[in-house]
Image (cartoon, grey):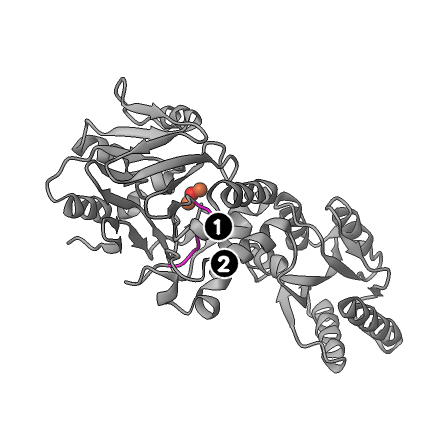
């Protein structure tokens, strides 16, 4: 049975929700599902904007058929070729073999690489600033290279102010019958999933996202965007400035808020104890916006997400095989891979005979841009002892002083 929502009088959401997928991109855990969004415009011509993952393929096709109500599908605009959106292209081609595919030249190359059976003349390549008119609706195309694939573009409908934003402004989480961000408690319920999606999927490409936001502001005017229709998560029709502001923070690597994230790597609980003690010392100083994570039991996508949120980070690690504890090493590698910048960091190292993790973590952090590594840190020999307490107090003071700046 079809399941569609109306976005505007002549634009329909025809996507689907996937609550069975355990790992998005086979890496990132999903506990609340994900939606694959696609949209049909009914004008003098009919236009489908993107397709959907094969996991929801049957639902998606039923939805498209219902909205078309017997009309042919004239155009398929492909903003992004990644298979979580493009997988159902083949099914569209089987049902509507005369459909014209409008997309970027790079996307055409990728469509062939992924093996879609495109017939001669089936694709129309568009470039930056090109327009197409489908009746009363005219759309313009803007390249969005490396947000987060090279072929990506966004499409802006100049008639009704709808921006088809591809993966930009997307989020993990299924829609559960609702569609618009204002139908949810977005800040309370969705923001963490939206941040985890952005930071882990697109986070590396902050400069490219900044360029896209600037292009949208200069060429379209943010006030002229009345709807944002992303490929995952809710559609924005109110308070668009809220999500744009989040993107400005995340893409510029500026923290959203002052706070301290403490991540510890502990084999037998002694480094964990030091991390707990530091959190208590911070609370004694009135610093309550703190989060404490065990790097071994927290999926790194959650750690990366909170890194983009908080201004300060404490890494506390045991020394393991004369190196950094492997899950902590992996966390540091992900920070580098995702281009994290502009954080203040304090280090705590532990080792029973040759503590080295502090110096080694510092080496890794120095590979990142604009990181402020506090001189105050702590070296433990197996466990936190009475003689370490002055160092613990000094470390808490240093973090408090930095937060106060
Ligand atoms: Fe949701 Fe880049 O695909």
Residue reaching furthest to the top: 120
Locate residue 326, reporting x and y percent.
Answer: 66, 51
Which of the two discs, 1 and 2, sits closer to the camera?
1
Image side of residue 157 versus residue 196, left or right: left
Per the picture, the main secondary structure of the magenta-coloured stretch is loop
Image check: 128 left or right of 1? right
Where is residue 239 drawn, in percent x and y?
45, 62
Q: Where 132 falls versus 63 (above or below)?
A: above
Residue 404 in magenta stretch: no
Circle 1 residues within 10 Å: few <14, some 14–19, many ≥20: some
Q: Secondary structure at mark 1?
A: helix
Does the beta carbon at disc 2 come under 8 Å from ligand 1? no
* 343 sits left or right of 180 in the view: right
Residue 115 position, x and y percent, is 33, 26
Q: Secondary structure at mark 2?
A: helix
Which numbered circle lies on residue 241? 2
| Start-end of magenta stretch | 167-173
Quadrant where the image shows the N terminus? bottom left
Number of on-image labels: 2
Determine the image quadrant of residue 103: top left
Measured along the vertical axis of the image, is residue 13 above or below residue 95? below
- Tell me whether circle 1 and circle 2 mark residues in contact (CB < 8 Å): yes
Residue 350 numbered tag: none
> Residue at horizontal 59%, vertical 49%?
251
Q: Which mark is residue 222?
A: 1
């Amino acid at each position: 049975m079809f399941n569609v929502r109306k976005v505007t009088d002549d634009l329909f959401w025809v996507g689907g929700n996937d609550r069975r997928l355990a790992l998005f991109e086979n890496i990132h855990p999903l506990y609340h599902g994900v939606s694959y969004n696609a949209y049909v415009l009914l004008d003098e011509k009919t236009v489908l904007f993107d397709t959907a993952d094969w996991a929801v393929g049957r639902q998606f096709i039923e939805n498209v058929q219902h909205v078309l109500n017997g009309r042919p599908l004239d155009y398929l605009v492909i903003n992004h070729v990644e298979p979580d959106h493009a997988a159902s292209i083949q099914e569209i081609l089987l049902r509507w073999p005369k459909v014209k595919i409008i997309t970027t030249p790079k996307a055409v190359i990728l469509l062939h690489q992924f093996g879609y059976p495109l017939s001669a003349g089936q694709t129309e390549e568009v470039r930056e600033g090109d327009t197409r008119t489908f009746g009363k609706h005219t759309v313009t195309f803007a390249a969005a290279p490396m947000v987060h694939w090279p072929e990506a573009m966004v499409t802006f409908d100049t008639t009704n102010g709808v921006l088809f934003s591809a993966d930009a402004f997307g989020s993990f989480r299924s829609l559960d019958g609702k569609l618009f961000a204002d139908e949810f408690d977005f800040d309370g319920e969705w923001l963490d999933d939206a941040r985890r999606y952005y930071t882990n999927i697109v986070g590396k490409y902050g400069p490219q996202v900044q360029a896209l936001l600037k292009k949208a502001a200069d060429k379209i005017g943010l006030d002229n965007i009345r709807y944002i229709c992303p490929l995952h998560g809710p559609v924005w029709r109110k308070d668009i400035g809220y999500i744009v502001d989040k993107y400005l923070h995340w893409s510029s690597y500026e923290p959203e808020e002052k706070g301290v994230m403490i991540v510890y790597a502990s084999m037998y609980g002694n480094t964990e104890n030091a991390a707990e003690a530091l959190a208590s010392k911070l609370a004694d100083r009135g610093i309550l916006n703190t989060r404490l994570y065990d790097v071994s039991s927290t999926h790194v996508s959650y750690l990366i997400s909170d890194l983009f949120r908080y201004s300060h980070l404490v890494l506390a690690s045991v020394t393991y095989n004369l190196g950094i504890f492997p899950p902590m090493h992996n966390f540091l590698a992900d920070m580098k891979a995702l281009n994290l910048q502009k954080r203040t960091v304090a280090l705590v190292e532990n080792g029973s005979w040759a503590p080295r993790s502090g110096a080694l973590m510092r080496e890794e952090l120095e590979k990142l841009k604009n990181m402020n590594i506090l001189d105050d840190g702590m070296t433990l020999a197996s466990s936190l002892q009475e003689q370490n307490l002055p160092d613990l107090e000094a470390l808490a003071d240093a973090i408090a002083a930095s937060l106060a700046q």
